[in-house]
Image (cartoon, rainbow, N blue to C red):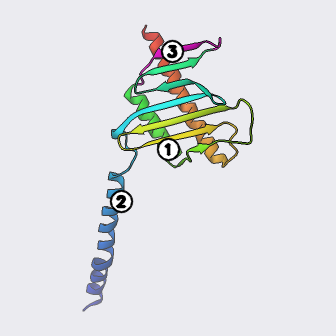
Amino acid sequence: MTTRSKKVFLVMSIVVPFMAYCLYYYGMMIKNAPYKFSEFQSIHFEYGFGDTLNNIYDSKTGEYQFVNRRDSLVKIKMYLNKDDLLYLHRKAADLGFWDFPANELNPDVKGKVPRFSIQFNYLRKSKKVMFDASFDGDPKLKDANERLIKEIQTILNDAEARQRNVK
């Protein structure tokens, strides 16, 4: 065997099967990803102080209740469009929401502290996170939670403004 044929044999017997295996393995991982937008059903978002989470939005039913500036409870029907839901799904994926722990609460803090509950529901799976503003864990995790909460609130405010302008 010549040196060239030895190199070709080496490449064909090691590199090609490795590449084929990588394509198969990662292709199956992407195909079976648990949180795909094509399987997205709804988002449920609650927030308030302490254990009273009286600001609630459910994208499945469109029910949105919140406390306004005059401390009055307002209930409206408001549906998010597909672009808003896709944006929130992608933002959650970018911030690593699927890897957040389920409870990010600070049991040492007493009193009324802002608390948030975020739940993304999919066909086969759902992910729910309870976040306390006084959470003293990893600063990067806290920042990611705060950014996701800010994005959800911005989308809800924009959708409410759109609905007000249509009427």
Between disc 3 and disc 1, whose residue precedes?
3
Label for residue 74?
Answer: none
Q: Indicate the amino acid at tag 2.
A: Tyr
Q: CA distance from mark 3 to mark 1?
A: 31 Å
Between disc 2 and disc 1, whose residue precedes?
2
Residue 62's x, y, as percent? Answer: 42, 22
Residues in magenta?
A: 69-80
Front disc: 3 or 1? 3
Rendered residue at 66%/49% (across/down): 138
Q: Is residue 71 magenta?
A: yes
Q: Quadrant of residue 87?
A: top left
Rendered residue at 71%/29% (across/down): 112
Q: CA distance from mark 2 to mark 3?
A: 46 Å
Front disc: 2 or 3? 3
Q: Is residue 160 magenta?
A: no
Label for residue 94?
Answer: 1
Q: Indicate the amino acid at tag 1.
A: Asp
Instruction: Check contact, mark 3 vs mark 1: CB within 8 A.
Output: no
Q: Quadrant of residue 144?
A: top right
Q: Is residue 79 above or below residue 136?
A: above
Residue 52's x, y, as percent? Answer: 62, 26
Q: Quadrant of residue 5?
A: bottom left
The residue that label 2 is drawn on is 26
Residue 128's x, y, as percent? Answer: 51, 40
Describe the element under mark 1 as helix, strand or loop.
Answer: helix
Q: Indicate the amino acid at tag 3.
A: Lys
Residue 109's x, y, as percent? Answer: 74, 38
- Horizontally, is 153 left or right of 140 in the view? left
Rendered residue at 37%/37% (across/down): 40
Farthest bottom residue? 1
Q: CA distance from mark 2 to mark 1?
A: 19 Å
